[in-house]
Amino acid sequence: MSNESIKISDGMRSGLLERALMRHVYYQGPEFMMPTFTPAGWWECDVWAVTKSGYAVEYEIKVSRADFRRDAQKYKDFRCHNAKSQELSVWESLNKLKMIADKDGRCQNRFYYVMPAGMIELAELPANCGLITFGEYAATDSRSHCFSQYGKVVKRAPLLHNVKPNPTLVQQGMVSAYHRFIRGVMA
């Protein structure tokens, strides 16, 4: 193996960053956490955690500036009540970052961006978002590339609202985590 650094793909960097983040969150002592989980009526969360006080925290991993900028374009269609008929018949296209900025009760209680240190300036961070960064170490081979095990909370995410996730949603996450584990063990 030569002494030159090996080019690490964004997918591999994302996976390594996810692992570092999971360690970081684990040591904070959440009630429950899970990677790649989509709460009902929300976007996919790179890491989703529920604190001991019952609040949901979303962690969104970004490995490039372009990936970070694309987040502003995330829209999702939601069904909502028609004020006249009281039926779920109206579709509304909503922007994730606008919902967070507006402290919409449908979003998670806290929202963090997670990325390599120095990727963005704090002034670029959208309203009501927190930021956790990890130091990145150069790779000499694919096994030695890693992120610091200690994340730095550059900006603590504010509490967006006091509406705790439905216990059924948390149970759904736990069941999903269990089945992922069993599939992994049985494979």
Image (cartoon, helix red, strand yellow):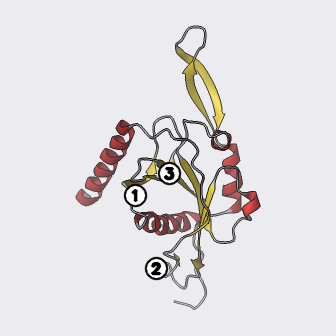
- Residue 57 is tagged as 3
Q: Secondary structure at mark 2?
A: loop
Tell us which disc is closer to us: 1 or 2: 1
The outermost residue toward the bottom is 3
- Evaluate if marks 1 and 2 touch, with contact meaning CB atoms under 8 Å apart: no
- Evaluate if marks 3 and 1 touch, with contact meaning CB atoms under 8 Å apart: yes
- The quadrant where residue 78 appears: top right
> Label 1 neighbourhood size at 10 Å, few (<14), some (14-19), many (20+)?
some
Residue 79 image position (x, y, % from top left): 55, 24
- Label 1 and label 2: CA atoms lie apart by 28 Å
Q: Earlier in the sequence, mark 1 or mark 2?
A: 1
Report the front residue among 52 and 104: 52
- Horizontal side of 86 relative to 23 (left or right) equals right
Q: Amino acid at mark 3?
A: Val
Residue 110 image position (x, y, % from top left): 55, 50
- Residue 30 is tagged as 1
Residue 115, placed above or below residue 127? below
Q: How many marks?
A: 3
Q: Amino acid at mark 2?
A: Arg
Which residue, given by chain and number where applicable, does mark 2 sit on?
Answer: 143
- Label 2 and label 3: CA atoms lie apart by 30 Å
Q: Secondary structure at mark 3?
A: strand
Q: Secondary structure at mark 1?
A: loop
- Label 3 and label 1: CA atoms lie apart by 10 Å
Report the front residue among 186 and 88: 88
- Horizontal side of 73 relative to 27 (left or right) equals right
- The quadrant where residue 85 appears: top right
Residue 103 image position (x, y, % from top left): 62, 40
- Horizontal side of 168 relative to 98 (left or right) equals left
Residue 68, placed above or below residue 88? below
